[in-house]
Image (cartoon, helix red, strand yellow):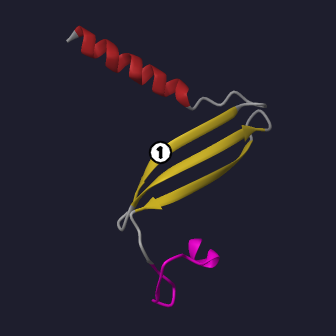
Amino acid sequence: MKYFIIVIALLCMQATFAQAFSGKGDIKFQVGANFQNNGTGVMGSLDFGVGENISVGVASTYLLGIDKITTIEGNEEPFAKFEDRF
């Protein structure tokens, strides 16, 4: 039981420092899971610190297990057009 509590405490402590922003020159990379009603995906992001409280970054998500998408007009297509992605 002691071992279990120590492991949980260490994991919680690590999680508190995982996303701490250090300021200018800081780089953060994140990978995670994306759960939606019609599919699941993988999400990733990268942030660059440009000031003490400001960062600029990019993010992307890839949806898994989708063969065709339904467009705004209701047509099924193998790939989404650029305007359907926002």
Residue 80 placement (x, y as % from top left): 55, 76
Residue 70 placement (x, y as % from top left): 45, 81
Residue 10 placement (x, y as % from top left): 40, 17
Image point 46% across, 89% down: which residue? Answer: 75
Position of the C terminus, as image quadrant, is bottom right
Instruction: From this view, report whether residue 60 is shown above or below residue 84.
Output: above
Q: Secondary structure at mark 1?
A: strand
Range drawn in magenta: 69-86
Within 10 Å of disc 1 (Cα), the crowding (few <14, some 14-19, many 20+) is: few
Instruction: From this view, report whether residue 41 is shown above or below residue 76.
Output: above
The residue nearer to you, when weighing 32 against 55, is 32
Quarter of the image where one finds residue 29: top right
Three-letter amino acid code of the residue under disc 1: Gly
Residue matched to label 1: 32
Picture mark count:
1
Residue 2 placement (x, y as % from top left): 24, 9
The residue nearer to you, when weighing 73 against 55, is 73
Quarter of the image where one finds residue 40: bottom left
In the rendered image, the residue lying farthest to the left is 1
Image point 74% across, 41% down: which residue? Answer: 54
Question: Horizontal placement of 75 versus 81: left or right?
Answer: left
Instruction: From this view, report whether residue 42 is shown above or below residue 50.
Output: below
Question: Horizontal placement of 31 versus 23: left or right?
Answer: left
Tell me, yes or no, whether the highlighted magenta stretch contains residue 75: yes
Question: Horizontal placement of 40 versus 62: left or right?
Answer: left
Tell me, yes or no, whether the highlighted magenta stretch contains residue 2: no
Position of the N terminus, as image quadrant, is top left
Image point 74% across, 30% down: which residue? Answer: 23
Image point 57% across, 32% down: which residue? Answer: 19
